[in-house]
Amino acid sequence: MIAKTHVLAGLLAGGILLTEASGFRVDNEALFLVSVAVGSLLPDIDHPQSVIARFIPIIGIPIGRLVSHRGFFHSWFGMTVVFTLLGMALPGFKDSYTLVNGVDVWGIAVLWHGLLLGYFLHIVCDMLTVSGVRILYPLHWKIRIPLMRTGGIVEFFFRWLMLACILLLVFGESQF
């Protein structure tokens, strides 16, 4: 799938969580949605022409040359490694999510969870393509539910459907 589709899938899922999931609450909804959108781009750091690799070329270009696309970074193992390292790198993340009186002061937990949701959804969306993903990397076995081709007409309509759903979430309960 292309970046626009991944970002829309992340924003739709994040929006549904924020508006429809009872008991789901974050201290900073905007940070959560932005981190979900960024997280939905992260697995493609292994492709030198991806949005995220071009945005962070000092990391993206070397990684794109070292690993194959839809390999390590598109697996459960890769996701676990990335988020373990991210959790260790984020200041104060180990200290009860930097909670002070139950509030995520620096937004670290919101950021981490948003990135994780977006990353996870990217992998799930790529499973829906003909190419699939090597979810159990380094095993060569792929999971694919071949509903669409990357950049194909089905993905195009899927993207517009997600955009319509997002608009319904945003404007559905307001009066015009």
Image (spheres, rainbow, N blue to C red):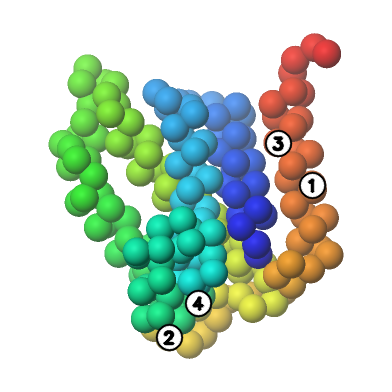
Kind of residue indicated by mark 1: Leu
Q: Which mark is residue 166?
A: 3
Report helix, strand or loop for mark 1.
Answer: helix
Structural distance between the alpha carbons of marks 1 and 3: 9 Å
Q: Amino acid at mark 3?
A: Ile
Q: Nearer the viewer, mark 4 or mark 1?
A: 4
Numbered circles on residues, count: 4
First in residue order: circle 1 vs circle 2:
2
Specify the quadrant that holds the N terminus. bottom right
Q: Which residue is mark 2?
A: 139
The label on residue 69 is 4
Question: Residue at the location (35% across, 65% down)?
Answer: 59
The residue drawn where x is 48% and y is 87% is: 140
Q: Secondary structure at mark 3?
A: helix
Residue 83 appears in the picture as rendered: yes
Quarter that holds the C terminus: top right
Give the numbered dot on residue 161.
Answer: 1
- Secondary structure beneath dot 2 equals loop
Q: Earlier in the sequence, mark 4 or mark 3?
A: 4
Upstream in sequence: badge 4 or badge 2: 4
Q: Amino acid at mark 4?
A: His
Quadrant of res 14: top right
